[in-house]
Amino acid sequence: MWLITTLVAAIGVTILWHVAPKIYKLEILSLMLWGSSIMILVDHLLAYDGRAFVEMETGGLITNSIVLGIVMLIPVLIIWITVLIIKKPKKNIEWR
């Protein structure tokens, strides 16, 4: 299910990228989310053993796969916010 969560986030951010102002640098967030979606898809394909392709439970520390998907999005959002803070948008300020 974390594959679905990441794909939904990637699609949503891509749509916002084309609608929102460019100062939010959503192209960076979109690229990171699509990269992680492809990475998770390849992981699912390589580890597929005939069971359900999208599972609701995991065998790890976080047992709910939706919560795992959201937790996986947090570092991506932190990196994106850090990029926004470092590359502040420069506005043309007129001094009178």
Image (cartoon, rainbow, N blue to C red):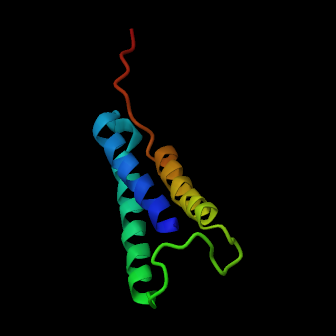
Up the image or down, 72 lies above or below 83; here it is: below
Residue at point 45% right, 62% down?
4
Residue 80 in sight here: yes
Q: Is residue 65 left or right of residue 80?
A: right
The answer to which of 4 and 90 lies nearer the viewer is 4
Q: Quadrant of residue 40?
A: bottom left
The x, y position of residue 70, in whole percent, is 58, 58
Provide residue 25's location: percent of width, then percent of height.
37, 45
* Residue closer to the observer: 37 or 82: 37
Q: Nearer the viewer, residue 19 or 85?
A: 19
Residue 79: give x, y in percent of width and height.
52, 57
Where residue 52 sits in the image (x, y, percent)? 48, 79
Q: Is residue 88 left or right of residue 34?
A: right
Q: Residue furthest front?
A: 51
Q: Residue furthest right?
A: 61
Residue appearing at x 34%, y 33% in the figure:
21
Which quarter of the rendered picture does the C terminus lie within?
Answer: top left
Residue most extreme to the left: 18
Residue at image location 49% in from the left, 59% down from the top: 5
Q: Which residue is at 28% across, 40% downward?
A: 18
Q: Is residue 28 visible?
A: no
